Image (cartoon, rainbow, N blue to C red):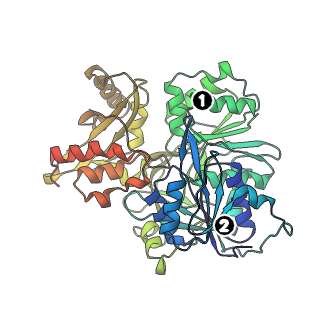
Amino acid sequence: MWYKKGDRIAAFVPNSLESSIALMSTLSTGAIWSSCSPDFGVESVIDRFLQIQPKILIATNGYEYNGKKYPKTNEVVEIIEKITSIEVVIWIDFIQAAIPETSVRNLIWDDCLKEESNGLFFEQMDFNDPIWILYSSGTTGLPKAITHSHGGMLLEHLKYLSLQNDVKVGERFFWYSTTGWMMWNFVHASLLVGATAVIYDGSPAYPNLEFLWKLADEHRINHFGTSAPFLVACMKANLDIKAKYNLQNLRSIGSTGSPLPPEAFDYVYNNIKENLWLCSMSGGTDVCTAFVGSCIERAVYRSEIQCRALGVSLEVWNESGESVLQEMGEMVLTKPMPCMPIYFWNDIDFQRYNASYFELYPNVWRHGDWIEVSEHDGLIIYGRSDATLNRHGVRIGTAEIYNVVNQFKEIKDSLVVNLELKGGAHYMPIFIEMNDGLVLEESLIQEVKNQLKSQYSPRHVPDEFIAIEQIPYTISGKKMEGPVKKILLNMNLEKAYNKDAMRNPESMDFFIKMRDEKGFEI
């Protein structure tokens, strides 16, 4: 064998059967897995993998998206040249294209499968032995190399899939993801409960927004996982899924990635299927699971996540550090979870680890979400606390504004920030991406303002509505309110955001130009 227990195996691969096989093979032999999606920029991949010094790189020669092939051999060669610890590269011929020679040992996936084997081998692991390394978004600095444990992930994923998601033996479990998002790792936990993991690579909207629902119908999927923006996109497109697809096997729809607006709850039950379970959840790469999620014995209330997950000592704290109910505050964990990171790779003396989670409250994990415990003991998430709109001392969750904007089908997407300026002034613009062919007119702006006032308060009304071609997102699908705010407040661009961690780095040009023109004083 070319590697041993503790060696890192890095993968630059699409969401494919080969990728899942490689993951399982790595874990069974005690090596440590780490993956990036092939839509990541080269520097973004190097920023991640260089930290962990992998011995083997599993790489694709390309991938397909929106019906187009994207060759990646040049990028792989560059990665190998920059990361000198790589001794072997195993190529997956994903797009049937030429595979180049490299400066390290070159192997082909199909040839490796043909090699004789001495049979299955499983390395005995300790509870806290590392299982895989995930990464923070890296939008404003070097990504954190978040290292998880075998025992923690085994306990947590077995708990969540069986008890929170109610996944049964023989069922089919699907979650739209890429290998660069923790939900890809999470999908494989369905195997722990005897279910079948359904994998898919490509755009969720190609050839149209109905395609994944068609897949769910044809493949008799029982649990369908996706992101909140996908459900919102289906809602705005007026897709009447239940009129076209049977979905008789579908028991649950999972949603994560960002808060699911209340109108999307209505849409799921009115337009997709009436008798199903909407399992909204929220967690993160930090724990590779959900802090709050689903409970089959509880009712589903619009805009709410059903419960705190089992084994999660979650509280909501106000500015005085007091636990509160039915009031927005900081989400904190007062006791450890089994699946908290064992460390960040190469983080000497846990300096970055402690700064990330325990700097504000000693020995209490602050996750960085604004959250509320509802009257039903459910959870309402208002967005990231570091992107909170602190307007004249009143805290506003970005999700409240997005909930209203999402009600307007003319609007494709939006992003809002609040700038605290010199002399105590505040400036809160909202950037609007319209649907194709539509213009942001004053009449629409007035309608949005009226709804913000009536549904929330006058403080929720932005100071300016600005049309923009595209909203900036990370590769993992997170809106970039924080980096946009830093750009507008004239922070050094290299520290404000990392373009290689973005899905659409060209979108930042608008904000850089706006900063130069406006010249905000802080």
Crowding at mark 1 (Cα within 10 Å: few <14, some 14-19, many 20+): many
Viewer-nearest residue: 235 or 140: 140
Viewer-nearest residue: 21 or 59: 59
Query: Seen in the image, is 456 located left or right of residue 275?
Result: left
Confirm whether residue 388 shows in the render: no
Viewer-nearest residue: 139 or 167: 139
Residue at 65% from the left image edge and 50% from the top image edge: 93
Q: Earlier in the sequence, mark 1 or mark 2?
A: 2
The residue that label 2 is drawn on is 152
**Callout 1–callout 2 Cβ contact below 8 Å:** no
Q: Kindly indicate the quadrant of the structure image that contains residue 58.
A: bottom right
Crowding at mark 2 (Cα within 10 Å: few <14, some 14-19, many 20+): many
Query: Seen in the image, is 237 located left or right of residue 30?
Result: left
Q: What residue type is labelled 1?
A: Val
Confirm whether residue 448 shows in the render: yes
The residue that label 1 is drawn on is 268
Mark 1 residue element: helix
Q: Where is residue 457 in the image (x, y as percent from the top left)?
A: 32, 35
Q: In this view, does 452 lie above or below 24?
A: above
Q: Position of residue 339 (x, y in %)?
A: 62, 65
Q: Position of residue 88 (x, y in %)?
A: 63, 68
